[in-house]
Image: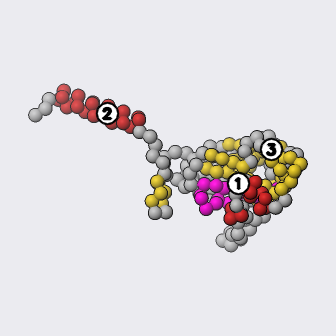
Amino acid sequence: MTSPALMTATLALLFAIGAANAASAERIPPTPVQDVVVIAPKDPKVVATFPADGASIASGTVVIKIVFDQPMTPEAWAYDRAKTGVFPDCLARPRLLPDKRTFVLLCSLAAEQSFAMEINGAPGFVSAAYRAVPPFQIRFSTTDASTLSLHDALQQAGLTDADDPIMDWDGASGVSNAQPVRTPQP
């Protein structure tokens, strides 16, 4: 039979070893398992955008691209006017591409203007694990050069024609997802 002091010391040692292992453990990345993804317990973050924050790009037809670090929910998104800059003329809804990490939004931008978009100001973008994306802004400006075709706009954003941002008719709600939205300027 062991003494209570020895048991207490043994438990304390085991607890200390377990705490040290937990503190040094790295987060395990998502693991795909036959079309199922086990998501690491972290909030999603933006890893890339087009245009990049502060960039100057050609005016005309532009595909705004937002890339996240983990799979996202297609119905969950939010973008709005930021406090600075003009809000671009864009389609009503972004499209989540098949990689489930990239949203694209077709816009038309006037030449030589400064634009700004608030992304997730009113939380909307959420991961497949329903974790919200922290709010952020994209600020960019346009030059007097112009992009006229959707093909060129897709290439400019590092996309292909298969990444077309225009979605099909949504018969369930009776709303076309391809109608431009103009947000009034203050």
**Residue count near mark 1 (Cα–Cα under 10 Å), binned few <14, some 14–19, many ≥20:** few
Residue found at the very far left of the displayed protein? 1
**Which of the two labelled residues, at mark 2 and mark 1, occupies the earlier sequence position?**
2
Q: Depth-wise, is mark 2 or mark 3 nearer the camera?
A: 3
Q: Depth-wise, is mark 2 or mark 1 nearer the camera?
A: 1
Query: Can residue 90 be seen?
Result: no
86 displayed left or right of 124 = right
SS for tag 3? strand
> In this picture, which residue range is highlighted in magenta?
94-108
Q: Nearer the viewer, residue 149 or 7?
A: 149
Q: Depth-wise, is mark 3 or mark 1 nearer the camera?
A: 1
Q: Nearer the viewer, residue 137 or 171?
A: 137
Residue found at the very far top of the displayed protein? 5
Residue 102 highlighted magenta (yes or no): yes
Residue 95 highlighted magenta (yes or no): yes
Q: CA distance from mark 2 to mark 1?
A: 48 Å
Q: Nearer the viewer, residue 17 or 93?
A: 17
Q: CA distance from mark 3 to mark 1?
A: 16 Å
Looking at the image, which residue is at 46% across and 54% down? Answer: 31
Query: Can residue 48 be seen?
Result: yes
Which residue is disc 2 drawn over?
Answer: 17
For the residue marked with disc 3, what is the amino acid? Ser
**Which of the two labelled residues, at mark 3 and mark 1, occupies the earlier sequence position?**
3
Q: CA distance from mark 2 to mark 3?
A: 53 Å
Give yes or no for contact between labels 2 and 1 (Cβ–Cβ under 8 Å): no
Give the image location of residue 138, x and y in percent.
73, 44
Residue found at the very far bottom of the displayed protein? 171
For the residue marked with disc 1, what is the amino acid? Gly
For the residue marked with disc 2, what is the amino acid? Ile
